[in-house]
Image: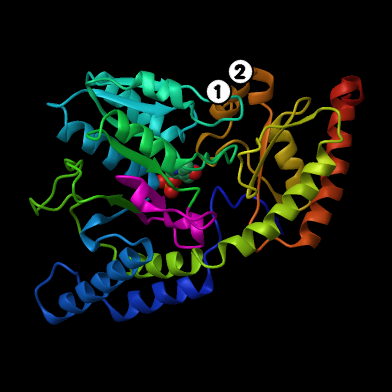
Amino acid sequence: MIYLDYSATTPISYDVLDSFDKASKEFIGNPNSLHGLGVKSRELMNSATKQISELFGVNESEIFYTSGATESNNMALIGVAFANQKRGNHIIVSKLEHPSIYGICSYLEKLGFEISYVNHTEDGLVDFEDLKSKMRESTILVSICAVNSELGVRQPIKTIRQIIKKENPNVYFHSDMTQALGKIAVNLKDVDLASFSIHKIYGPKGIGLLYKNNMVKMAPILYGSSKKDLRPGTPAVALIAAAAKAIRLGIQDLSRKEIFIRKLNEKIRDEVSLLDQVVINSTQYSIPHILNISLLNIKPETFIHAMEEYDIYLGTNTACSSGEISSSVMALYNDKKRASTTIRISLSYLTTTEEITRFLNCFQIVYKKLNYLMENPTDYE
Ligand code: PMP
């Protein structure tokens, strides 16, 4: 099998699975229980939180556990909107966000919040002048994805923060860092809130994080037994222990991994760009882990399934919106054909050079066959 859909999700690392397994077997108590078993589980959870907060250089009280980045994004945007509505009702997001952010924005719009979509340069970077001009007295939050999930475009988060805070220091800055963690260095000092999903960094599915600076006012979006908990319910102790392990391992050796992945990316890019109906959508600001291309003549589903025959697994825009056109490619190129024929090849440090050689051989075969059939449709009969 050749798996090239690492940005959709990653296989769990055995070390992480081991932590999950041990914690599940040995820490059976509910961390909210007062007895010894509960206390033991609470201690494990607290030590995982301490480890995570140290790895990120933040306070333990600033880490919240969620089910994944979709929930973290909901907590951040809805929670901040509700808690700060007396101050204002205006939120700014980019046009290169994950679909979950747009889903939340349309919900907030129905409630009377106003959303502005900041423009970007032709390479996908947030247009700083447009961001400045969109900020108003009533702006309470700006949310910009650190690395776009479809094109891999990486935003200059530190500079964006400086621009926002210079215009108005009371405006909070949230970044969806789901595709950044484990691929590039993330610095939580650059943001007030950040979202993560642990299954993107070789951890289990069903656990995410929200970082929220202690100064940020945020209302809960879930209500339960505890009045002071921003995310009530029984904490998933074993998933939390696994998350700490996944983060510790996931942020190691990033530049060495990136150099290797860049070589693989260039090998693919050099070869596929020679094909006449193939265009590269990733830009000069895309991280090498994500290579987005359009096969202008071929339906992505058809291509993906044909590659599957060779036991090769690729992505079409995001796994979360399969079948639809790529909102990011549409935002960047304003070309429906290009946006409806995208393939996302996402790489990992686990990917081998041999896998890429085989992938490229199969790509050529499948591409030529499907392209021929598109140009000679009568041969179908
Ligand atoms: N944000 C980004 C940038 C993502 O890539 C994803 C996953 N595709 C999400 C949010 C949502 O993560 P999850 O499905 O784990 O909730």
Seen at 33% across and 62% down, the residue is 57
Identify whether 276 is placed above or below 257.
above
Tell me the kind of residue under disc 2.
Asn
The residue shown at (24%, 50%) is 213
Does the beta carbon of the residue at mark 1 sit less than 8 Å from ligand 1? no
Residue 67 at least partly seen: no
Instruction: Report how far apart the C-alphas of labels 2 and 1 lie in the structure.
Output: 6 Å
Magenta highlight range:
181-208
Residue 342 visible in the picture:
yes
Q: Residue at x 30, y 28 (%)?
A: 167
Q: Position of residue 105 (x, y in %)?
A: 34, 27
Disc 2 secondary structure class: loop
Counting from the top left corner in percent of width and height, residue 123 is at: 61, 30
Q: Is residue 77 left or right of residue 98?
A: left
Q: Amino acid at mark 1?
A: Ala
The part of the image, by quadrant, that contains residue 356 is bottom right
- In the picture as drawn, the residue positioned furthest to the front comes out as 166
Pointer 2 and pointer 1: residues touching (CB < 8 Å)?
yes
Q: Quadrant of residue 111?
A: top left
Q: Which residue is mark 2?
A: 334
For the point 45% across and 77% down, the residue is: 18
Mark 1 secondary-structure assignment: helix
Task: Measuring from the top left, give residue 281's x and y in whole percent.
Answer: 67, 32
The image quadrant of residue 22 is: bottom left
Which quadrant of the picture is home to ligand 1?
top left
Residue 195 included in the magenta stretch of the image: yes
Mark 1 — residue?
A: 331
Residue 184 or residue 236, whichever sits in front: 184
Q: Quadrant of the C terminus?
A: top right
